[in-house]
Amino acid sequence: MHWNNRGKKSIVWRCVNRLEKTGLFCDARTVLESQIEQVLVTAINQALCDKDSKLVTLQNNIETVLNRENNQTLAGIDKRLEEIQIKLLKLASAKADYEYVADEIYRVREERQKVQLESASRDELKRQISNTITEYDEPLVR
């Protein structure tokens, strides 16, 4: 929740029983979100810096999944693009209307570019996975 304590605004986490006045007693203290973020950063760094084989396997699995998603998507787009280009050549040779096919090629090329940008983001995540992080990063934690 957003909290205004003595004129200082912050985001805190509180027990729902304290917020909704359910009548149930809760002795859990209020925790600043920044403290939770710092604990997560510490935990992630401990996990990533530990050379335990299970963690190395986990890191490799994450990288494999990131690579597989990208490779399968790009391969499918490239195959579709090749099919459309062949169709365009046939239509152009037959002097038929090929404008809709050309539009499809542009659309697929834009889709490919989008996937390549996502690939760059995945590469950045892979880089971050292998390095110690210094501050909380919501997408990386997710």
Image (cartoon, rainbow, N blue to C red):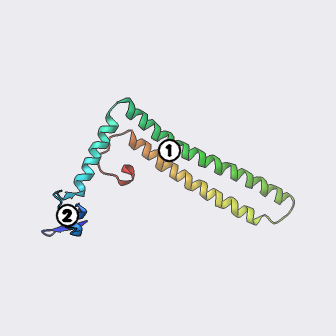
Q: Locate residue 50, reporting x and y percent.
A: 32, 33
At mark 1, the secondary structure is: helix
- Residue at 61% x, 58% y is 110
- Residue at 52% x, 42% y is 67
Q: Locate residue 130, reporting x and y percent.
A: 39, 38
Residue 29 in the image: above or below residue 65: below
Q: Which residue is mark 1?
A: 66
Q: Locate residue 123, reporting x and y percent.
A: 47, 45
- Tell me the distance, in whole angstroms, between the alpha carbons under discs 1 and 2: 45 Å
Q: Earlier in the sequence, mark 1 or mark 2?
A: 2
Q: Locate residue 139, reporting x and y percent.
A: 39, 53
How would you rate the neighbour count of disc 1 (Cα within 10 Å): few for under 14, some for 14-19, many for 20 or more? Answer: some
Q: Is residue 40 visible?
A: yes
Q: Which residue is mark 2?
A: 24
Q: Amino acid at mark 2?
A: Leu
Residue 42 in the image: above or below residue 91: above
